[in-house]
Image (spheres, rainbow, N blue to C red):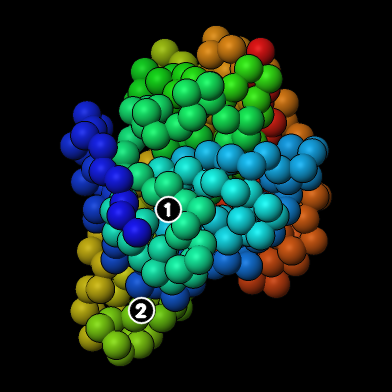
Amino acid sequence: MTILRLDTQTDSDVLDVVSRHYEPMMRVHGEINFDVDLGEADVTVAATVYGARLPSVVYLPCCGALRHAPALLARGVERLVAVDLSLESLTAGMARNLSGADHEMLTVCQADLRRARDVLPEDGVELVFLGGNSIGDVTDVEGHLQFIAALADALAPGGTLVFDYAGDRYAPEPGAAVTEWPEIFHADGVDVAVIDRRSRRQTRVPGTAMHALQITCEVIDPETGEVYVAKHSYSKLMVPDAVLVEQFAAAGLALVNVGRVVEMSRYHRERVRDVGDLGMLGAPNCFYRATRL
């Protein structure tokens, strides 16, 4: 199957973060890129939030390695339009998370979702599912508003956007800004015991009630000091719900916070309790429903 590649005007620093983070981190065993069980649990909650039988065409922006795609197709979706900036994630996800038969029901595109309208039906789609806490992926304020506007434009009148988001409920605690845990890194056919070390800090976005959460990550061999994933940073925009409602309303969307994922999903609740590996996508994460007016 061919992955469509659209010309993009995405800021070079955003593309740089994508290339430096997603490809090497896909080799970390505990990362969620290929966790189809988690993907299925996410889709189960999303379907409940949607509240109706899934439509025949669904749009999956910021899809990463397509871990949500198998569960959506299993629920009867006939055409899945999947878009992500990372070509490495899309390629790996198609090989590892999907069968050849699944490919026939996919339109996969490497693009910035703000410029991906041409791969969608002319009249829009009835359902967009945005997983992975992705609503905060663009930390530039104007870019963030464009992100929301593009999601609204992808919807047919009356269509629904379902997404998960930690918002401003997640913030690093004083004295606990650096965490590390043992991991396995798949290094060219050899599994290596490593340490995944991350630090977190937040800064206020000037003139707003929003914060930018910067996460710095590195993966090293604790015995030899060999670096398997070089230290790099990526950011999330932390938007309070009241501000998010206003931003969505400006784009023609009525937004509702449906509730915490751990209160809607036994899988998420038990995973947070037993494994604790969901980080800011765990206990403080909520699901939202936005309807195009």
* Residue 251 shows in the view: yes
* Residue 191 shown left or right of residue 62 in the figure: left
Q: Mark 2 to mark 1: distance in Å?
A: 19 Å
Bin the neighbour count of mark 2 within 10 Å (Cα to Cα): few under 14, some 14-19, many 20 and up. many
**Residue 185 versus residue 155 in the image, above or below:** below
Residue at 53% in and 25% down: 124
Helix, strand or loop status at disc 2: strand
Along the viewing direction, whichever of 166 and 71 lies nearer the viewer: 71
* Residue 37 shown left or right of residue 107 in the figure: right
Residue at numbered disc 1: 64
**Residue 110 versus residue 258 in the image, above or below:** below
Along the viewing direction, whichever of 252 and 204 lies nearer the viewer: 252
Residue at 21% in and 38% down: 13
> x and y percent of residue 43 in the render?
66, 52
Helix, strand or loop status at disc 1: loop
- Marks 2 and 1, the one that precedes in the sequence: 1
Residue at numbered disc 2: 185
Residue at 68% in and 20% down: 158
* Residue 205 shows in the view: no
Bin the neighbour count of mark 1 within 10 Å (Cα to Cα): few under 14, some 14-19, many 20 and up. many
